[in-house]
């Protein structure tokens, strides 16, 4: 894929600054119309996008629709329904000391936005933030991943057909293009990717004190205690780990399991894999491939870091890695110090839940935390550790509720989005104090002659 020329990037950036300055995007009717255009475009381009997802990732139509298209369509519908109320001027209580003034909150767009998306969910993670940008009244330059060339090409065609580039445009290319974009002044940056690249984005943003939303990742733990429903745990973990072949920022990254349950968990994990993908996972139409040879080699290298309890088959030509359970005892091994982002699942045994929680808390704060066991045990674990989001007796599904925010904490991210939080992410909440002219209380003026009385009001 060819890089967008630097001169073209500058031209688009300048045109978007000029368009935002017209204040056209402040109009709620305009925002709703643009959201409806995006919805119609996604319906029209659904088939080409799903075909491209299969070409780049071997992602089935069903999985492409469920994890990419449907999520964006749902997000757009929510914003169309609520953007008017979210944008309304709101009155807030004003203390007596400010009498006779009134205070209001006004939501206004941050301005020109940059959205940089990764390759693992290339449609959802580019367009979902865009919904928030449109809803809030921002312009947007979209930067898809070069690793999914077919998807990125279709996205560019769709956006170009749907929007004027002075409002929303796609820029293509590698990390050189990312650097060129990050050298420019934006009013907000939304980035999804690895923690290491997140630091690069944040460093660049600091030059202009640009606010950022960073959706990163990390090693999301999954604890299975002795009270867990082991059949349900195996089913939901095997689904969460093989979804997109583990190339999901909130995929279970490693399992901490009570020693008495390991053998049964492995057995039931295998049974559920067969139910979902058949006897030979490689032949499954729903099993995604690694994105490229580099990632295949990286994830394959982890197979030597423990004892293979299940799986372990690989095919470099197809970039296929079989779902693999790996018993690990060396917590300093590479598989336990890097986000796996693939279908290899380390298993670490424990006898006391305290050990498991201590291990989680010694590591950077993860994007997700999963616990299988009695509800009271799960809530106790939630109170004793932190993460961007969490599920008790489930995996992945907390991301699917558009009424609750999704985001990381610490090493796993900064800021959040989905639903109203997407609108807020691209908005500035502005305080406006209105003071009438019919009364001018003298206490605030020097020489503060009424200070001894006013002091009691403060």
Image: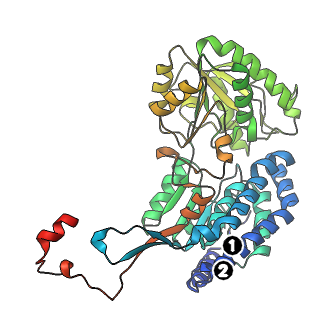
Q: Secondary structure at mark 2?
A: loop
Q: Residue furthest bottom?
A: 438
Q: Dots 1 and 2: beta carbons under 8 Å?
A: yes
**Is residue 422 something one can see in this rendering?**
yes
Q: Residues within 10 Å of mark 2 (few under 14, many from 20)?
A: some
Give residue 93's position: percent from left, percent from top: 40, 67
Question: In the rendered view, would you say 208 is above or below 217?
Answer: below
Which quadrant of the structure image shows residue 203? bottom left
Looking at the image, which residue is at 74% across and 25% down?
312
Q: Which residue is mark 1?
A: 169
Q: Residue furthest top?
A: 260
Q: Secondary structure at mark 1?
A: strand
Q: Which mark is residue 217?
A: none
- Quick one: quadrant of the C terminus? bottom left
Looking at the image, which residue is at 44% across and 69% down?
208
Q: Is residue 390 left or right of residue 95?
A: right
Give residue 365's position: percent from left, percent from top: 49, 39
Q: Which residue is mark 2?
A: 166
């Amino acid at each position: 894929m060819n890089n967008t020329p630097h001169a073209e990037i500058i031209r688009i950036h300048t045109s978007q600054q000029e368009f935002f300055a017209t204040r056209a995007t402040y109009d709620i009717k305009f925002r709703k119309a643009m959201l409806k255009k995006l919805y119609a475009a996604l319906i029209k381009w659904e088939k080409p996008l799903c075909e491209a997802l299969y070409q780049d990732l071997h992602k089935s139509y069903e999985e492409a629709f469920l994890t990419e298209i449907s999520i964006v369509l749902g997000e757009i519908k929510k914003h169309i329904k609520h953007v008017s109320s979210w944008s309304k001027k709101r009155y807030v209580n004003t203390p007596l000391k400010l009498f006779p003034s009134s205070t209001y909150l006004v939501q206004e767009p941050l301005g020109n936005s940059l959205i940089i998306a990764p390759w693992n969910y290339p449609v959802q993670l580019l367009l979902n933030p865009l919904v928030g940008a449109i809803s809030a009244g921002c312009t947007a330059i979209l930067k898809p991943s070069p690793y999914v060339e077919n998807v990125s090409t279709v996205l560019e065609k769709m956006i170009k057909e749907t929007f004027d580039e002075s409002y929303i445009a796609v820029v293509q290319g590698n990390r050189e293009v990312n650097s060129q974009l990050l050298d420019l002044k934006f009013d907000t940056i939304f980035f999804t990717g690895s923690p290491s690249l997140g630091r690069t984005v944040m460093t660049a943003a600091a030059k202009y004190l640009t606010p950022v939303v960073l959706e990163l990742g990390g090693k999301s733990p999954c604890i299975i205690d002795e009270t867990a429903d082991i059949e349900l745990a195996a089913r939901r973990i095997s689904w969460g780990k093989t979804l997109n072949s583990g190339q999901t920022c909130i995929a279970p990254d490693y399992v901490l399991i009570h020693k008495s349950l390991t053998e049964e968990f492995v057995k039931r994990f295998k049974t559920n894999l067969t139910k979902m993908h058949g006897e030979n996972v490689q032949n499954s139409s729903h099993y995604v491939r690694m994105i490229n040879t580099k990632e295949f080699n990286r994830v394959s290298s982890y197979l030597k870091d423990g004892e293979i309890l299940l799986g372990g088959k690989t095919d470099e030509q197809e970039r296929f890695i079989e779902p693999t359970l790996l018993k690990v005892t060396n917590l300093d091994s590479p598989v336990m110090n890097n986000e796996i982002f693939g279908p290899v699942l380390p298993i670490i045994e424990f006898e006391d839940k305290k050990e498991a929680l201590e291990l989680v808390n010694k590591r950077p704060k993860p994007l997700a935390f999963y616990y299988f066991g009695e509800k009271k045990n799960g809530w106790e674990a939630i109170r004793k550790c932190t993460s961007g989001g969490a599920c008790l007796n489930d995996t992945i599904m907390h991301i699917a509720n558009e009424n609750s925010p999704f985001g990381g904490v610490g090493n796993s991210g900064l800021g959040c989005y989905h639903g109203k939080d997407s609108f807020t992410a691209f908005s500035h909440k502005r305080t406006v104090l209105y003071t009438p002219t019919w009364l001018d209380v003298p206490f605030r003026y020097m020489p503060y002659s009424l200070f001894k009385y006013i002091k009691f009001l403060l």
